[in-house]
Image (cartoon, grey):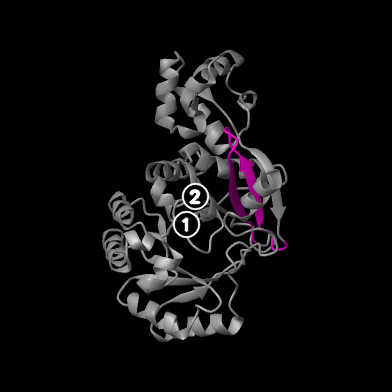
Amino acid sequence: MNTMMRTDCRDLNQEELIRLCSELGLPSFRGRQVFQWVQQKAIQGWDEMKNISVLDQKKLQTGLTLQPFTKVKEQVSRDGTRKFLFRCYDGETIECVLMDYDRLKNRDRHTVCVSTQIGCAVGCSFCATGLGGLRRNLSPGEIVGQVLDITHIMRQEDPDFQVTNIVFMGMGEPLLNYDPVLKALHLLNHPSGQGIGMRRMTISTSGVAAKIRRLARDNPQVGLAVSLHSANNTSRNQLIPMNRRYPLEELMAACQEYTELTNRRITFEIALISGQATREAAEEVGQLLKGQLSHVNLIPVNPVVETGMARPTAREIQEFAQVLEAMGIPVSVREEKGTDIDAACGQLRRQVEGEQI
Ligand code: SF4
């Protein structure tokens, strides 16, 4: 059998599976069953589809593949954060993180941070993923597959485990892989799949203004987070090369359009780096966000050996937040997750690939 001609069933929505079943001479309810097994129950093999005969499973396999990731490594932080390194069908590796919070105090909220690309072309100066450039985009099934495989792993410990929130903040720039990301949102949202509400999913972008405008028009009602990091074009050019293509004026115009069309508040993320988290920088942010429906998330950076970035002091962080509050901008300092493991984007992958070289 030629596996190259078959489609990954995690890539397909329910309608596409029903269509494929009819092409294979199977009744349409088989398409609904396959969708539920794959997208809701997160099964790992055909023989787990208990209500589908072996004969029909074999027919399905002529058109479809089911290829869960191979788990290469798992790190568990003292705070409950778990970081996974998965290997794809072609040998590439991707990272994803389960932010599990305190199991006893917060059993209802389980957030997964997914990757959308292998590597990244944006090349932010503080990010380990950007160091190696872009290798390839992930398919919708590979994006959703991170949630499904984490669900499968966790259900072995806790049969009722359910992911409740998704952040598209792992490796890659989600808006530079727009169509697969949008399809992944709909797969994760489907009531016969994971059923995760659109408002419980957040896309994080480095500022691809043209795609922010497109997302505003498509309006899937997901959260949008913009990695702002600096409100000054000169320093933002250094941090996020995307700023040369879409400078702050253009980015903010796209953000205004986004809030007008969707009525949604945008989260602006600011990585605080020692030496750059100054009072003047905070005032520039306050000026830039005047009149924009916004919330600011301050994120003290995880140190990355290759980039030499260091975390600011607690006093610098507090002062930055106070300046914004005084200017009327809602602000919070994001709880840091997994600082005792390689939790910053791209760190684990680089470490493991380095071991293999
Ligand atoms: S921070 Fe995000 S957009 Fe920037 S290089 Fe890293 S993965 Fe790419």
Give the answer, above or below, for where 167 lies relative to 295: above
Number of residues whose C-alpha sits closer than 10 Å to that of mark 1, classed few (under 14), some (14–19) or many (20 or more) = many
Q: Earlier in the sequence, mark 2 or mark 1?
A: 1
Whether residue 255 is visible, yes or no, is yes
Quadrant holding the C terminus: top right
Q: Nearer the viewer, residue 23 or 272?
A: 272
Residue 202 found in image quarter: bottom left
Q: Nearer the viewer, residue 99 or 14?
A: 99
Q: Secondary structure at mark 1?
A: loop
The kind of residue on which mark 1 rests is: Gly
What span is in magenta? Answer: 78-101
Residue occupying the point 43% across, 33% down: 13
Mark sitting on residue 123? 1
Q: Position of residue 61 (x, y in %)?
A: 54, 19
Give the answer, above or below, for where 184 lies relative to 62: below
Q: Which residue is mark 2?
A: 133
Q: Is residue 80 magenta?
A: yes
Q: Position of residue 48 (x, y in %)?
A: 64, 27
Q: Position of residue 70 (x, y in %)?
A: 65, 37
Residue 181 found in image quarter: top left
Give the answer, above or below, for where 102 lies relative to 286: above
Residue occupying the point 66% across, 62% down: 338
- Asked if disc 2 and disc 1 are in contact, CB closer than 8 Å, the reply is yes
Beta carbon of the mark 1 residue lies under 8 A of ligand 1: yes
Q: Secondary structure at mark 2?
A: loop
